[in-house]
Image (tube, rainbow, N blue to C red):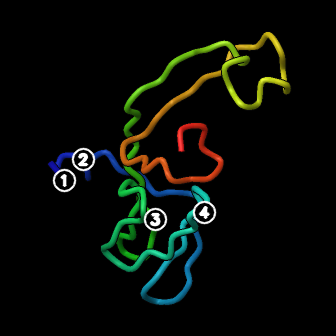
């Protein structure tokens, strides 16, 4: 399965190089330092060849009234798009599901 999923990767944008062995991912609040060949906490972003690679697979999405979201006050009456990616660990403090 890992081989099939690895074909659906792309280079990430939210990262920096820490040294010749590690990069830091900024895609969530965990700010994972990721060693070569290892994944971050989410198991979706990983270090491959000194670059952040991301599995670009959306597991589910939905359109909901914004009043169901924690940021309902931003645009009352609007529609919010929610989506979930593979590997979500539900541990980010800002996540509505944590």
Percent position (x, y) of residue 60? 41, 26
Residues at marks 2 and 1 touching, judged by CB atoms closer than 8 Å: yes
At x 85%, y 27%, the residue is: 74
Q: Residues within 10 Å of mark 3 (few under 14, many from 20)?
A: many
SS for tag 2?
Answer: helix
- How far apart marks 3 and 2 lie (CA) works out to 15 Å
SS for tag 3?
Answer: strand
* Residue identifier under label 3: 52
Instruction: Point out the frontmost of discs 3 and 4.
Output: 4
* Residue identifier under label 2: 5
* Residue identifier under label 1: 2
At x 76%, y 30%, the residue is: 71
SS for tag 4?
Answer: loop
Residue at the farthest front position = 98
At x 46%, y 35%, the residue is: 84
In the rendered image of this protein, does residue 74 appear above or below residue 5? above
In the rendered image of this protein, does residue 88 appear above or below residue 68? below
Q: Residues within 10 Å of mark 4 (few under 14, many from 20)?
A: some
Residues at marks 3 and 2 touching, judged by CB atoms closer than 8 Å: no
Q: Quadrant of the C terminus?
A: top right
SS for tag 1?
Answer: helix
First along the sequence among labels 3 and 4:
4
**Seen in the image, is 14 located left or right of residue 52?**
right
- How far apart marks 3 and 4 lie (CA) works out to 10 Å
Percent position (x, y) of residue 41? 42, 62
Q: Nearer the viewer, residue 73 or 13?
A: 73
Residues at marks 1 and 3 touching, judged by CB atoms closer than 8 Å: no
First along the sequence among labels 1 and 3:
1
Q: Residues within 10 Å of mark 1 (few under 14, many from 20)?
A: few
Disc assigned to residue 26: 4
């Amino acid at each position: 399965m890992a081989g099939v999923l690895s074909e659906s990767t792309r280079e990430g944008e939210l990262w920096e190089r820490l040294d010749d062995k590690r990069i830091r991912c900024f895609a969530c609040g965990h700010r994972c330092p990721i060693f070569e060949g290892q994944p971050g906490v989410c198991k979706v972003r990983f270090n491959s060849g000194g670059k952040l690679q991301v599995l670009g697979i959306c597991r589910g999405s939905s359109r909901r009234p914004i009043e169901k979201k924690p940021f309902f006050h931003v645009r009352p009456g609007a529609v919010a798009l929610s989506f979930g990616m593979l590997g979500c660990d539900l541990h980010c403090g800002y996540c509505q599901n944590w």
